[in-house]
Amino acid sequence: MEKGYIQVYTGNGKGKTTAAFGVALRAAGAGMKIFIAQFVKGMEYSELEAFKRFDDCVKIKQYGQGCFIIKKPTLQDKEKAQQGLKEVKQALSSGYYDIIILDEANIAVYYDLFTINELLEVIDSRDFSVEIIVTGRYAHEKLIDKADLVTEMREIKHYYTKGIEARTGIEK
């Protein structure tokens, strides 16, 4: 059994979740089992529909409300994130999954839905063979230090600044 590594995709540019989901797609093609925990997100995205086609090897769960946190998180935001972290810990110890993606976990830490120490404790509970991918802006230095691979997406230019809304199949 090969060692699993810790990957982090962070930064203010587009593509963090997309990169993680690209790994999930590749892994599904290789017959691996993937668990995706989407923190903060509770909306319908096209990738949810796409992953239904891989329901034999990809499980995706959302631990957020109907919209992304813009201001101060609510108690319900925190409860959902805490529940997600608990379920991730169970998934990590199940021996079933090869890859676990913690989508927007960095944002959950940033908004204090759970602490960096709680996140690292969950990561440390994994079997050595499980690959973990953590996405979201504002990756904490402790996570960056622990990670084996860190990629920062840097926005150079984005059409959003010209008023282009998120488009189905491209950004949502």
Image: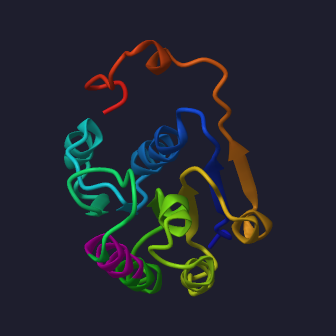
**Percent x, y of residue 91:** 39, 79
Q: Is residue 83 magenta?
A: yes
Can you tell which quarter of the image residue 125 is in? bottom right
Q: Nearer the viewer, residue 78 or 34?
A: 78
Picture residue at 35% right of the left edge, 24% below the top = 170
Q: Is residue 159 left or right of residue 64?
A: right
Q: Nearer the viewer, residue 94 or 88?
A: 88
Number of dots carrying numbers: 0
Q: Residue furthest front?
A: 71
- Look at the picture and state if 45 lies above or below 56: above
- Look at the picture and state if 163 lies above or below 166: above
Q: Residue furthest right?
A: 145
**Percent x, y of residue 5:** 67, 65
Picture residue at 33% right of the left edge, 51% below the top = 68
**Percent x, y of residue 137:** 58, 50
Quarter of the image with the C terminus is top left
**Percent x, y of residue 26:** 47, 43
Q: Is residue 24 magenta?
A: no
- Look at the picture and state if 136 lies above or below 171: below
Task: Tell me which colouring the rendered structure shows.
Answer: rainbow
Can you tell which quarter of the image residue 58 is in? bottom left
Picture residue at 65% right of the left edge, 37% below the top = 153
Which secondary structure class fits the magenta region best? helix
Q: Over which residues does the magenta segment extend?
A: 76-85
